[in-house]
Image (tube, rainbow, N blue to C red):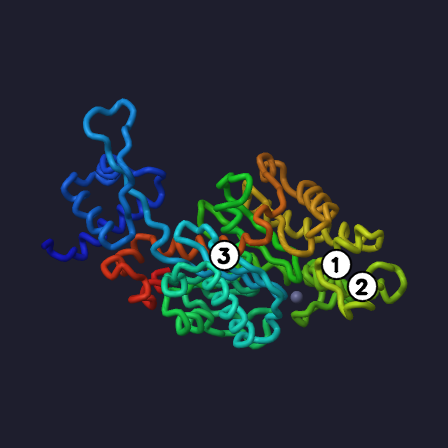
Amino acid sequence: MQAPPTARDILVLAQIVDLVRGTESATRSFIEAETGLGRAVVNDRLAEGIELGVLEELEPVHEPGRRGRPSRSLRFRADGGVVLSASLGAKSMYASVSDLEGNALASTDRAIDVADGPEATLRVVHRTFQRLLARAGDGAEDRVWGLAIGVPGPVEFRTGRVIAPPIMPGWDGFDVRGWFLEKYGAPVWVDNEVNLMAYGEWARGVPQERRDLLFVKVATGIGAGLVTNGHLHRGDNGAAGDIGHVHVTDDKKAICRCGRTGCLEAVAGGWALLNRLEDAARAGKAPWAAQRLAEKGELTLGDLGTAEAHGDKIVATMSSRNARVAGQAIAGVVNFANPGTLVLGGGAIRGSSLFFDTFRETVLENTIALATRNLTIRTASLDFYEGAIGGALLAIDHLFRPSALRLWLADADPRVRADEIHAVG
Ligand SMILES: [Zn+2]
């Protein structure tokens, strides 16, 4: 019978688990070399990690050029728990249940309206999670170790509260973390949805570059997220990247839904585009959109590309103008942040290559040469799930950083000290 691990043992184990997670095949000798710990200590800590269910030993393999007994390598157990993630736009959400390596076990998307307020919206998210957990099977509903929620507004990341969002009535100060903590009893991280998208594209986007990445979402609204040195840049209050409401024109007719005039969104946001397309349809200048409007009573972002494809020429004109305005605004950010990858995503560009081409051209025209010399500009590559994927990875990263691990390893379950774990940061 071994003595229970001390706080120091747990800290060392947390470092070993972190190392094993980041390594394809971690042998004991590799762990000794990387940590500088002796064999006996490594063996003790690994035995604890295996008993706690966070590590497992693989079948022995012969290492080429190495004599003696074949070494057994260690692997992180990705099936111990699951994480739930949801990325909420103004009008749609993407949600997943994932294993602890961030691989989705079940995913779905659905229409929402954040203007319905936090209670109604989050109930839809909760119901969606319940269905996903049932689909994932294997007792997933009893193994929820963490959640990540992205919302279309500024978030105080430390507390998981929405702060003064321009377009989310009823959400100001709402404790999104507390709401989900009460339902699931697991640690919850809340972030701006475009931050989650940026992180998802940085970690899993195609091609994998791992350079500093700027993500620009043009959907109903417009927002940006920046990953530098592998970390999200949230700013002092979590308002970084909230570019939809920067002033881009003195045109008093560009009335924004935030109540001001001349915002980027009022010129180039998806909702502004749809308003203008509806006006054009009513004025007889967009026949396909007019027919669609008559059938359905409203137009959605997905109709923009279809209207263009069906010959509503005005959509092409509007798209290229909007792409130019968005490109000019983003060029300033590129000059400042000097990302290696610029990703354009969001529902307003779906089905329109014209928007991307014009956006790209405008960014390159308006940036200094040094800032764009090695810049890759591409469209989002994860089929609109970049926010859900980024959320899952964010929750996992936070669960398994040594400062959090040492809080829950002894219990082998992060739910026991959920409150302390998500407060670690
Ligand atoms: Zn505005």
Q: Nearer the viewer, residue 334 or 93?
A: 93
Secondary structure at numbered mark 1: helix
Percent of width and height locating residue 284: 90, 63
The answer to the question of whether label 2 and label 3 lie on touching residues, with beta carbons closer than 8 A, is no
Ligand 1, by image quadrant, is bottom right
Left or right of 360 on screen, residue 93: left
Looking at the image, tell me whether mark 3 or mark 1 is earlier in sequence order: 3
Percent of width and height locating residue 321: 77, 52
State the residue position of label 3: 106
Residue type at the position of mark 2: Arg
Of tags 3 and 1, the one toward the viewer is 3
The answer to the question of whether label 1 and label 2 lie on touching residues, with beta carbons closer than 8 A, is yes
The image quadrant of residue 265 is bottom right
Residue furthest to the top: 65
Looking at the image, tell me whether mark 1 or mark 2 is earlier in sequence order: 2
Does the closest atom of ligand 1 sit within 8 Å of the Cβ of label 2?
Answer: no
Which residue is rendered at x = 51% and y = 40% of the image?
Answer: 208
Q: Nearer the viewer, residue 58 or 412?
A: 58
Q: Nearer the viewer, residue 123 or 139?
A: 139
Query: CA separation, marks 3 and 1?
Result: 27 Å
